[in-house]
Image (cartoon, rainbow, N blue to C red):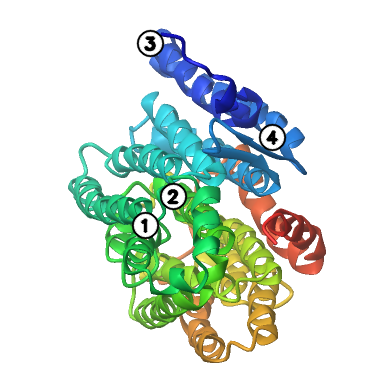
Amino acid sequence: MTINLNGIGIDYGAILPELIVTGTAIIVLFLDLLVPARRRGWLAVVSIIGLLGAMVATIPLWGQNRAAFGDTVVADSLAAFFNVLLIVISILTVLISPRFLRALDLDYGEYYVLLLGATAGMMLLAAATSLMTIFLGIELLSISLYVLSGFARTAVRSQESAMKYLLLGGFATGFLLYGMALIYGATGSTTLRGIAAVTTALGAGASSNVLLLLGIGFLSVGLAFKASAAPFHMWTPDVYEGAPTLVTTFMSVATKSAAFAAIGRVFIATFPSIASRWYFPLALIAIFSLFIGNLVAITQDNLKRMLAYSGIAHAGYILLGILPGTAEGFSATLFYIVAYAVMNFGAFAVVTVLGAGGERTAELNYWRGLFYRRPFLATVMTIFMLSLAGIPPTVGFFAKLFVFRALVDAQIWAPLIVAVIMTIVSFYYYLRVVVVMLAAPDEAAVEREPIGISTGTVLGAAAAATIILGIFPAVVLNWATHAASLHF
């Protein structure tokens, strides 16, 4: 029997960045068998080289619109946008990893393999245009993160966080698959383009198709779980607190970015004809996220849990840009994702540095007088806190402004009012961290060990980007607008 592959559209160039990252993971896996334990820092170097190679392979994809492999993946500006973002996050994570891993006696080569595997899954999710490839991307990143969450093998809390993430993640995957099955049953297609064509052809009938609407609802649950959006957020604070801080730093921004890439493709690009049906559930998820994230964050005395609930709130802000279903709204969402990645990565990186230096508590009381003990760390942390709160001239201010403007233009008032009120509420717990760091220390300031050149460079770059992108937001906004425009 002869199999005709001509109609499949084999195009390895479309997924070359993902292939390079996957290949790098395999190379690192084999190198770990050969490299002595004292020289495992070279695994980080190889990982960075592979990620830079994927970055180079991503550049030609900008401005294209190449569907490949039976319309299951696409090489376009949106995929390139998220590829660059995810690769940068991964590179920064690798740069701060060796010091932290050695400090906690976790310097194992499989860490880099899992990190690269998760990155490849996220990049695949951003390029997925089929229900099957969405599932493959989610599972690849999830399995890697399940193991990374429990990477501190001797720490009970780390093992507990991995177990919670695994069990709740498996539960969410069940919803995701059931939703995909229902959508396939209603449309007869697994590709997003085919589903969109059937939905458009059905016209008004699509809005009353119970099978399709149930499928979209169940699919939303699985995607909202990955985005840490309420009320599907219950795993977030426990996993963020229990996982090694380095892992939390990576997953807090990278997973959310990939999840919203999929949400944008599914809702804005695939179901624009029934926007009136999915608007209300997404608006409720956004409002719940804003309320729960901001109000519960006020009560937290553990900085990792506070940032976890902060992430839930920011998932609500990001979702607000999806609600109008317009190019302006989606570009505001993309800008917000970049802004959140910069400032939240920096905040968690500061927590990571303190842990790597032997200061292994994230309790807020420990941060008292940090300006006197670690002035550089306290200064960059202040920048990140002000940006997360949305205070100008940081990038966080413009992230909120662009999302709010999209809601005003679309005349969506209820979520906007809630978002403005919750933004004011968030000032309390963000500025509380700054006040605690400025307070007089309980004991005389003690000189701590240096944070290292690579870690200091990462923190300085993140803090500089937080300010520079706040002063010149048009740079990223133009990229985000071009990436979003392909779907309108």
Q: Earlier in the sequence, mark 2 or mark 1?
A: 1
Real-space CA distance between mark 4 and mark 2, rounded to the nearest whole angstrom: 22 Å
Q: Residue type at mark 2: give it.
A: Met
Q: Nearer the viewer, residue 174 or 480?
A: 174
Which is nearer the eye, 143 or 339?
Answer: 143
Q: Position of residue 427 (x, y in %)?
A: 53, 83
Instruction: For marks 2 and 3, give the one nearer the viewer.
Output: 2
Q: Quadrant of the N terminus?
A: top left
> Compared with residue 254, is residue 439 higher up or lower down, i.e. above or below?
below
> Which secondary structure lies at badge 3?
helix
Number of residues whose C-alpha sits closer than 10 Å to that of mark 4, classed few (under 14), some (14–19) or many (20 or more): many
Q: How crowded is the residue under tag 3: few (<14 C-alpha within 10 Å), some, or many (20+)?
A: few
- Inter-mark Cα distance, 4 to 3: 30 Å
Give the residue at mark 2: 251
Please say if the residues under marks 4 and 2 sit with CB atoms less than 8 Å apart: no
What residue is disc 1 on?
Answer: 186
Q: Is residue 96 visible?
A: no
What is the quadrant of residue 76 in the picture? top right
In the picture, measured across the screen, residue 289 lies left or right of residue 384, that is left
Reply above or below: 96 against 387.
above
Labelled pair 2, 1 in contact (Cβ < 8 Å): no
Please state the total of marks drawn on the protein image.
Answer: 4
